Amino acid sequence: MKDTFALITGASSGIGLEISKSLAKRNHNLVLTSRRGSVLEEEAKKLRNTFGVKVDFFPCDLTDEKAPQALYDFCNKKGYVVNLLVNNAGYAIPTSFDQTSMIEEEKFIRVLGISVIALCKLFIIDMLKRNQGRIMIVSSVAAFAPPSSIQALYGPIKTFMNRFSEGLNRNYNHLGITSTAVCPGYTITNFHTASGVQKEMDSVPKFMKKAAPRVAEEAVEATLKGKKVCVPTKTFKIIVFLLKVIPHFFFSMVSAVLAPGRYEKK
Ligand SMILES: NC(=O)c1ccc[n+]([C@@H]2O[C@H](COP(=O)([O-])OP(=O)(O)OC[C@H]3O[C@@H](n4cnc5c(N)ncnc54)[C@H](OP(=O)(O)O)[C@@H]3O)[C@@H](O)[C@H]2O)c1
């Protein structure tokens, strides 16, 4: 019998790297992917040595429309049976909508949206043949929040991913496939520096900034159990509950104090 693998996008840092560790700890073999091959190589070596599982890596840029097929072909050629697909890669655009070129918006939508759909489309065919598969889509609390005064497309694309995940569950649960939309709140990773929004993150109170290993652990547990939605940490479970029950204008007012820069009127 062929070995099964978990494929993790955005595995070179932050939540993706912690998800990789959490899965390796549970004896899953891994295929890591992101753009930085040298970082992946280093992390793959550490994971193999620490957890004794098989770890391979494939560097690719998900802004490239050919990347999902190349990733699928890589796994196929190596004989890796992917029974867990983790769609985690992501970033934010720091400039306002009017100051961002259409090319940058398209790249953003491709990494956070189209590549996720393309990878699910490719790997789900094989999952269906085995009547077994787990999908994780790393979304965000932003999927439930009112539109931010910065990053016009970040929240909407995460809402879209939550709805897409719901659609996968509706269509494939009875065939053994589950999809988990993981919706973290503020998490300490490279995200804010890489996306040029570290100043905004610095102004967030400490109790709202969560550790990436904790977020990853909850995400992995929920995905392996086949849960539909996972909001890691009690703080953000309460915030998402409030987002669903209180009017958004009130939430925006409170957030302008707790997370300045996100909801102030321009
Ligand atoms: N941190 C937060 O507060 C937070 C909150 C809610 C949701 N999230 C979501 O969590 C996910 C992971 O983010 P993170 O916080 O762990 O950030 P991170 O530490 O910056 O990690 C992002 C990962 O995505 C990869 N990546 C970025 N652009 C890529 C591209 N074009 N092609 C392929 N890989 C790419 C990066 O690797 P390379 O640079 O090597 O390509 C890196 O491994 C994202 O989807 C984000 O939206 C984060």
Image (spheres, rainbow, N blue to C red):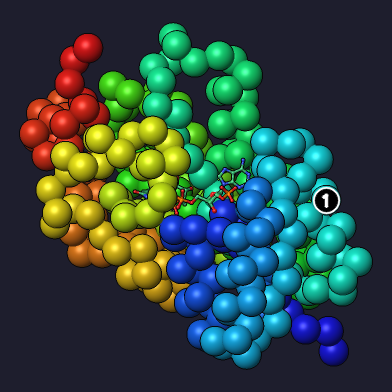
Total marks shown come to: 1
Say what amino acid the circle numbered 1 marks: Ala
Location of residue 186 in the rendering, given as x and y in whole percent from the top left corner: 28, 50
Q: Most extreme residue toward the top, as rendered?
A: 98
Q: Which of 240 and 17 is in front in this view?
A: 17
* Residue displayed at 81% across by 65% down: 75
- Height in image: 12 above or below 69? below
Q: Is residue 36 left or right of residue 149?
A: right
Location of residue 155 in the rendering, given as x and y in whole percent from the top left corner: 39, 34
Q: Which of 191 and 175 is in front in this view?
A: 191
Q: Is residue 128 left or right of residue 109?
A: right
Tag 1 residue: 70
10 Å crowding of disc 1: few (<14), some (14-19), many (20+): few
Indicate if the residue with disc 1 has its beta carbon within 8 Å of ligand 1.
no
Q: Most extreme residue toward the right, as rendered?
A: 77
- Height in image: 90 above or below 126? above
* Residue displayed at 40% across by 27% down: 94
Location of residue 193 in the rendering, given as x and y in whole percent from the top left corner: 38, 41
Judge whether residue 67 can be spotted in this image.
yes
Q: In which quarter of the image is the C terminus?
A: top left
Location of residue 221 in the rendering, given as x and y in whole percent from the top left corner: 43, 75
Quick one: SS at disc 1? helix
* Residue displayed at 48% across by 53% down: 138
Using the rendered view, name the quadrant where residue 83 is placed: bottom right
Judge whether residue 238 can be spotted in this image.
no
- Height in image: 67 above or below 254? below
Q: Quadrant of the N terminus?
A: bottom right
* Residue displayed at 44% across by 60% down: 15
